[in-house]
Image: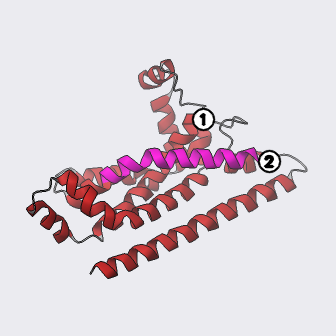
Amino acid sequence: MNAVWQSLAVATVATLLALPPAVATAWVLTRTRWPGRTALHGLTLLPLVMPPVVTGYLLLLLFSPKRALGTALESAGLPVAFHWLGAVVAAGVVGFPLLVMLVSVAFRSVDVRLEQMSAALGRSPWQTFWRVTMPLAWPGVAAGTVLAFARALGEFGATIVLAGHVVGETETIPLAVHAALDVPGAEQEVLMLTVASVVLGVGAVLTYHWLMERHRRRLELDR
């Protein structure tokens, strides 16, 4: 069951690393009039509409040890291609659009007039964000984070291209199931991994719905 723990570790780190840029992107998309918002929105959605294998290939080109970025990261002790960090990057990139979309929904649910009142009282945009926007939006942001985490748990295509199937390092549940299907007599292992995946998925979905319901009730009380 090492693949289960590997999946949990990869999904957790990938989601935590993706959360700050996702929040920043969602804020730009929902709270600014920057002319490049449309282009940013389209770029953000690309990993969602492209086949994961293609996303993985593009990431492999970017982080290849033969490229400048890949060489620099490897020299710094942070190799990405065909390493554990590659699985994290793949899961984070593929789940990033979903996270941005759900965080954007949470931000849009916050009444802009409250932020305007905060600014009128002399608070900076940064103070308004942390004292008004995030306290009201956090259950929705948390719900989006949980759903993005669940998406990261199931990532396969981009992971196998960028990180490869390295037992004990990049072998997540989807990769382990894929490999076990080609092994005669491994039906028990496949079943156990499948059950673990279903349990984790159901848990994440239930948590998401609980957080969204809490967010909805909180907004109704505030209004």
Residue 77 vertical placement versus 131 (above, below): above
Q: Which quadrant does the C terminus fall into?
A: bottom left
Q: Is residue 54 visible?
A: no
Drawn side of residue 44 relative to residue 187, left or right: left
| Residue ID for mark 2 | 180
Residue type for callout 1: Trp
- Would you say residue 17 sits in the magenta stretch? yes
The tag earlier along the polypeptide, 2 or 1, is: 1
Using the image as rendered, state which of residue 27 and residue 164 is in the foreground: 27
Q: Is residue 141 visible?
A: yes
In this rendering, the label closer to the viewer, 2 or 1: 1
**In the image, residue 35 lies at what x, y percent?**
16, 52
Per the rendered image, the range of residues in magenta is 1-25
Drawn side of residue 41 relative to residue 170, left or right: left
- Would you say residue 157 sits in the magenta stretch? no
Identify the residue shown where x is 72% and y is 59%. Answer: 196
**In the image, residue 72 lies at what x, y percent?**
44, 20
- Mark 2–mark 1 distance (CA, rounded to whole Å): 20 Å
**How many marks do you count on the picture?**
2
Contact flag, marks 2 and 1 (Cβ < 8 Å): no
Drawn side of residue 77 relative to residue 127, left or right: right
Identify the residue shown where x is 51% and y is 45%. Answer: 14
Using the image as rendered, state which of residue 114 and residue 166 is in the foreground: 114
Of the numbered discs in the image, which one, if any, rests on residue 84? 1
